[in-house]
Image (tube, rainbow, N blue to C red):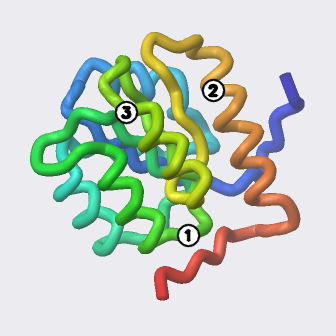
Amino acid sequence: MNGHQTHSPIGRILFVDQDIAMGKVLELILTNDRFQLVTVSSAEKGLEQMTADKPFDFVISGYTLPGMNGLRFLRQASELYQKSVRILMSGGYADSDEVSLAIREGHISRYVSKPFCYATFREDINNDFASISVGKTQLDYNAS
């Protein structure tokens, strides 16, 4: 694992899923001195959070959500925060053709199939964050 920098910028993660237990798991594996995790239970609340607060570096969504599925939510999220890393998680309910298309179109960055290896997921998030924050003291996304 890479050496820890004491003055690393704080990464912001929005997690959208009706599965409260998965939110708790992500809190355990991702919340440290580099990440702030905000968890909401619906796509509607996720979109509200995205427009009411400063930008998120990561937007992670489950597939099964009340109101709209996670893929549709991440398509909308990509319009709000084009520079965010958008991750779709699913226990097998997502249509693989739709997911592939969304990846090709740039609406989602990664698909994670549940169950998944927590250590690998955390490492991927840390690597992504290192990539987007290289040379920056603050993340300067504009939701224009």
Task: Tell me the residue at 48%/88% (across/down).
Answer: 144
Image x and y of residue 28, in percent: 46, 22
Comparing 131 with 80, the one in front is 80
Residue hosting label 2:
122
For the question of whether residue 11 can be seen, the reply is no
User: What is the CA distance from the residue labelled 2 to the residue labelled 1?
Assistant: 22 Å
Image x and y of residue 137, in percent: 76, 68
Tell me the SS state at disc 3: loop
Tell me the SS state at disc 1: loop
Disc nearer the start of the sequence (2/3): 3
Q: Residues within 10 Å of mark 2 (few under 14, many from 20)?
A: some
In the picture, measured across the screen, residue 98 lies left or right of residue 43, that is right
Q: In the image, what residue type sits under mark 1?
A: Gln
Q: Residue 73 is drawn in which quadrant?
A: bottom left
Task: Tell me the residue at 71%/27% (across/down).
Answer: 123
Residue hosting label 1:
82
Q: In the image, what residue type sits under mark 3?
A: Asp
User: What is the CA distance from the residue labelled 1 to the residue labelled 3?
Assistant: 23 Å
Task: Tell me the residue at 55%/69% (across/down).
Answer: 82
Residue found farthest to the front: 97
Q: Residue 52 is drawn in which quadrant?
A: bottom left
In the picture, measured across the screen, residue 49 lies left or right of residue 7, that is left
Q: In the image, what residue type sits under mark 2?
A: Arg
Image x and y of residue 65, in percent: 19, 39
Are dots 2 and 1 in contact, CB under 8 Å? no
Mark sitting on residue 18: none
Q: Identify whether 100 is placed above or below 19.
A: below
Q: Residues within 10 Å of mark 1 (few under 14, many from 20)?
A: some
Of the two numbered discs 2 and 1 in the rendering, the one whose residue sits closer to the viewer: 1
Residue hosting label 3:
95
